[in-house]
Image (cartoon, coloured by chain):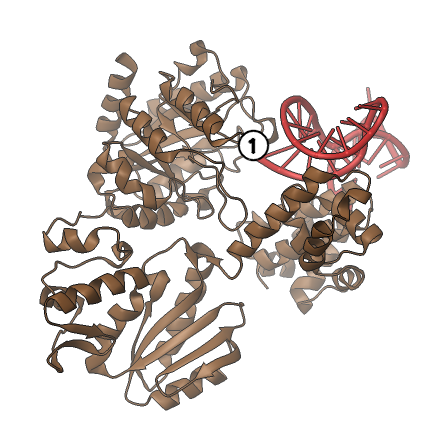
DNA sequence: GCCGTTTTCGGCCCGACTGTTTTCAGTCG
């Protein structure tokens, strides 16, 4: 049992206690415990073994006992006891925006609603408005929330699946009949959301491979199975499609199953125009296969330069490959530093010196600190006095650091009227200002766009933070005219953030190309709240590649000196 | 349920917003 699982169960206990109407502070103690365990920077099993749980602030006698039981036995009687009284469906209902434990528990107790289906039906029947505290608008909001949930159903976050997928493919590679195995599909294309895992396997004995898959520990249920293709549902809930091919079919199969569907359609049409035919078994001229030893040769045969998997979305990459105009995509090695990192001054976990060390360990040359601004009470946003204290600390550190630089920044709140929440006096003291929206999402597209436009026009705004505020799989972004915002950023030389947090990845890669064409710089920002969050950078880079970014388009691919010069120039204009 | 220790009981972050009310509970960040 790892700390993530432990943390999740503690959190669920907190929710269940609230649903039962018990002392809210008791629930909070469990939430807090869950957080503390999640943030633990060592192995939970070892902490338990050495009896050091109680040394963690926030873990008292009861929590320690519960965690010990959980880690030692893999289960927790207290948790199971609570779970017996509460239908699982209530947790789904809780995910709807606007519904918290009080309302959910009221729905359950007074209307007997215990899952999303029942709730949707009750809304359609107009039964919610009978309840005090509920009305017409709540009912509409719930229906909208259910619609969104349904839309996301069956999808998984790339970040939550990739490690699991790699684990599975590594197991498959150990099977003696398997000569080669590779991830294909949306995972290989590094899509932000994944529906299933596609794997291409090279073997001379496909039946034996299928047999192994069906009997594998990670397989929950067989959906369909034949000699070349088997689909199973995995224990984690998502599906795995495994395709077995012969060695000489591998290149074509890998290409075919990498997709995307739209890209494949366009590629097949192109081949047809050239008098060729492509499918998962080969490229054919008059039923005779043209041999390709790898994907590069595959593309060459079709008169194209190599198209990286991330770009295969039928968004202009085929035409670009034909004219040898594909961009040289950004890589991790191009990234020189990071902006948008939170510290203990606001809602981050680590101190500035700790973050500096972590950046250096990752080969980064500079760090742009940006804590929350004063309006963000919930995140301990910085008061003016905090800002000044932080500046002093950064100045002192910079005086000592060699080959590394800390930039002073802030993630300033864009208020409903579009203004930022510090005076000019303070704003001009920062090296850079990220302007973001964290609350009041409910404006119309026109209102939200104007709000952003005003923030972009602010001379102190260096970057625009997470443009739409979306949270993948849980919250749609606020409505906004993204093209207008991009054009405004171009006009006012405002950098657009590509927020690398795997739940955000906002700016969406589908708009990156437009931003590049308009001449906007993109900064791939981890939005880290702890050291480990710095590594979200890799998700941002993957998405940046999908968005055709090269190092010339990426702000944090600049060197320290170039960044300093850019920020100076901007201040003086 | 945790914490502190001038406290073994009493407090635990809080302001804005929404949608419901008719003065405020619930949700959110």
Residues A175 and A468: in front is A468
Residue A417 location in percent, x, y?
50, 19
> In this image, A8 relative to A568: left or right?
right
Using the image, determine if residue A389 lies above or below residue A212.
above
Residue A103 location in percent, x, y?
75, 44
Residue A544 location in percent, x, y?
30, 45
Chain painted in red in the figure:
B
Using the image, determine if residue A5 lies above or below residue A564.
below
> In this image, A177 relative to A144: left or right?
left
Q: Which residue is mark 1?
A: A442
> In this image, A499 relative to A522: left or right?
right
Task: State whether residue A492 appears in this view.
Answer: yes
Question: Which residue is depicted at the point 63% across and 61% down?
Answer: A49
Please give the chain letter of the residue carrying mark 1: A
Tell me the quarter of the picture where residue A77 sits: bottom right
Q: Residues within 10 Å of mark 1 (few under 14, many from 20)?
A: few
Chain painted in brown in the figure:
A
- Residue positioned most to the top: A425
Residues A366 and A103: in front is A103
Quadrant location, the N terminus of chain A: bottom right
Quadrant location, the C terminus of chain A: top left
Tally of numbered discs? 1
């Amino acid at each position: 049992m790892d700390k993530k699982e432990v943390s999740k169960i503690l959190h669920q206990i907190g929710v269940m206690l609230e649903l039962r109407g018990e002392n809210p502070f008791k629930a909070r103690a469990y939430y807090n415990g869950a957080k503390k365990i999640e943030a633990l920077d060592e192995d939970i099993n070892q902490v338990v073994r050495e009896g050091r749980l109680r040394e963690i602030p926030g873990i008292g006698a009861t929590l320690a006992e519960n965690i010990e039981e959980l880690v030692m036995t893999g289960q927790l009687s207290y948790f199971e006891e609570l779970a017996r009284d509460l239908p699982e469906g209530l947790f789904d209902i809780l995910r709807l925006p606007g519904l918290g434990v009080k309302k959910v528990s009221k729905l359950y107790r007074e209307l007997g609603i215990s899952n999303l289906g029942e709730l949707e039906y009750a809304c359609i029947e107009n039964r919610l408005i009978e309840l005090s505290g509920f009305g017409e608008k709540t009912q509409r909001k719930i229906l909208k929330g259910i619609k969104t949930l349904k839309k996301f159903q069956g999808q998984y976050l790339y970040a939550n699946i990739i490690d699991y997928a790699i684990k599975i493919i590594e197991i498959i590679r150990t099977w003696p009949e398997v000569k080669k195995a590779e991830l294909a599909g949306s995972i290989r294309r590094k899509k932000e959301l994944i529906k299933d895992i596609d794997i291409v396997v090279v073997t001379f004995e496909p039946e034996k491979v299928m047999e192994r898959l069906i009997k594998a520990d990670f397989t929950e249920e067989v959906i369909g199975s034949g000699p070349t293709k088997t689909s199973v549902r995995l224990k984690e809930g998502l599906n795995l499609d495994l395709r077995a091919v012969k060695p000489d079919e591998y290149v074509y199969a890998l290409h075919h199953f990498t997709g995307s569907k739209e890209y494949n359609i366009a590629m097949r049409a192109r081949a047809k125009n050239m008098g060729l035919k492509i499918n998962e078994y080969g490229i054919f001229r008059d039923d005779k296969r043209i041999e390709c030893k790898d994907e590069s040769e595959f593309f060459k045969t079709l008169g194209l330069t190599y198209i990286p998997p991330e770009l295969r979305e039928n968004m202009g990459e085929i035409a670009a490959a034909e004219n040898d105009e594909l961009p040289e995509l950004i890589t991790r090695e191009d990234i020189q530093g990071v902006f948008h990192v939170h510290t203990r001054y606001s809602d981050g976990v680590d101190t500035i010196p700790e973050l500096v060390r972590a950046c250096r360990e990752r080969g980064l040359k500079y760090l742009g600190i940006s804590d929350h601004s004063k309006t963000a009470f919930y995140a301990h946003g910085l008061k003016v006095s905090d800002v000044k204290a932080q500046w002093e600390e950064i100045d002192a550190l910079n005086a000592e650091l060699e080959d590394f630089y800390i930039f002073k920044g802030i993630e300033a709140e864009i208020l409903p009227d579009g203004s930022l929440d510090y005076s000019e006096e303070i704003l001009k003291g920062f090296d850079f200002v990220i302007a973001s929206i964290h609350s009041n999402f409910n404006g119309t597209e026109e209102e939200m766009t104007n709000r952003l436009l005003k923030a972009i026009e602010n001379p102190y705004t260096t970057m625009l933070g997470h443009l739409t505020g979306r949270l993948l799989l849980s919250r749609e972004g606020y409505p906004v005219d993204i093209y207008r915002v991009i054009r405004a950023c171009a006009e006012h030389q405002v950098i657009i953030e590509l927020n690398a947090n795997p739940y955000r990845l906002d700016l969406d890669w589908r708009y990156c190309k437009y931003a590049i064409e308009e001449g906007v710089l993109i900064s791939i920002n981890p939005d880290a709240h702890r050291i480990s969050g710095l590594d979200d950078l890799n998700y941002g880079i993957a998405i940046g590649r999908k968005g055709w970014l090269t190092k010339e388009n990426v702000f944090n691919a600049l060197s320290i000196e170039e960044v300093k010069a850019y920020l100076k120039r901007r201040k003086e204009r």
